[in-house]
Amino acid sequence: MYWEDTDAGGVVYHSVYLNYCERARSEWLRALGICQRSLGEVERIQFVVVDMSMRWRRPARYDDQLTVTAQPTARRGATITFHQEVRRGDELLADAEVRVAVLDARSFRPVRLPKAVAERMDAGSPVRVAH
């Protein structure tokens, strides 16, 4: 947690939680050995958030040690849905359902995941990222 993430009272801005979730999804891919740059250059695909629902339950504050999770819950056609949580220890501060579309990197049209990438994702497990 950094000062720049908070307001004058030391409370984390609501929009910063979106950044934390984005980083957790990126780290999930990295933990699977999937490089997003390579996906764009070689596989010609990219991921784009198309829908998100977030519930803020408790405020995070300056100097809190947070953990953010990314757990894929569904994959259908050209979308992947994640359940994500932001926690301070065992305390749930926020949770989100995030739907990510898989797009052709040139046309920005929806496409299915390449089979090898889908298999790697299916074999993966949730990731926890500290902030």
Image: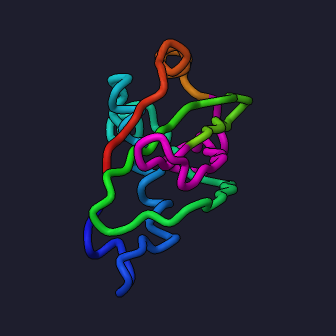
Q: Magenta stretch: residue 5 in it?
A: no
Could you tell whether 65 is left or right of 83 in the image?
left
Q: Position of residue 25 (x, y in %)?
A: 45, 41
Would you place residue 9 above or below residue 11 in this image? below
Could you tell whether 36 is left or right of 94 in the image?
left
Q: Which residue lies at the image location 28% right of the left edge and 75% below the top edge?
A: 4
Q: Determine if residue 124 is in view.
A: yes
Task: Place residue 32 in its image quadrant.
Answer: top left
Q: How many marks?
A: 0
- Give, as a single range, the part of the protein colored magenta: 85-112
Q: Which residue lies at the image location 48% right of the left edge and 20% below the top edge?
A: 125
Q: Viewer-proximal residue, 92 or 82? A: 92
The quadrant the N terminus occupies is bottom left
Q: Residue farthest to the bottom?
A: 8
Task: Place residue 30 in its image quadrant.
Answer: top left
Could you tell whether 49 is left or right of 68 in the image?
right
> Secondary structure of the magenta portion, mostly?
strand
Q: Which residue lies at the image location 52% right of the left edge and 71% below the top edge?
A: 14
Q: Position of residue 38 (x, y in %)?
A: 33, 35
Would you place residue 19 above or below residue 110 in this image? below
Q: Position of residue 13 (x, y in %)?
A: 46, 74
Q: Position of residue 70 (x, y in %)?
A: 50, 37
Q: Magenta stretch: residue 103 in it?
A: yes
Could you tell whether 85 is left or right of 130 in the image?
right
Q: Viewer-proximal residue, 111 or 35? A: 35
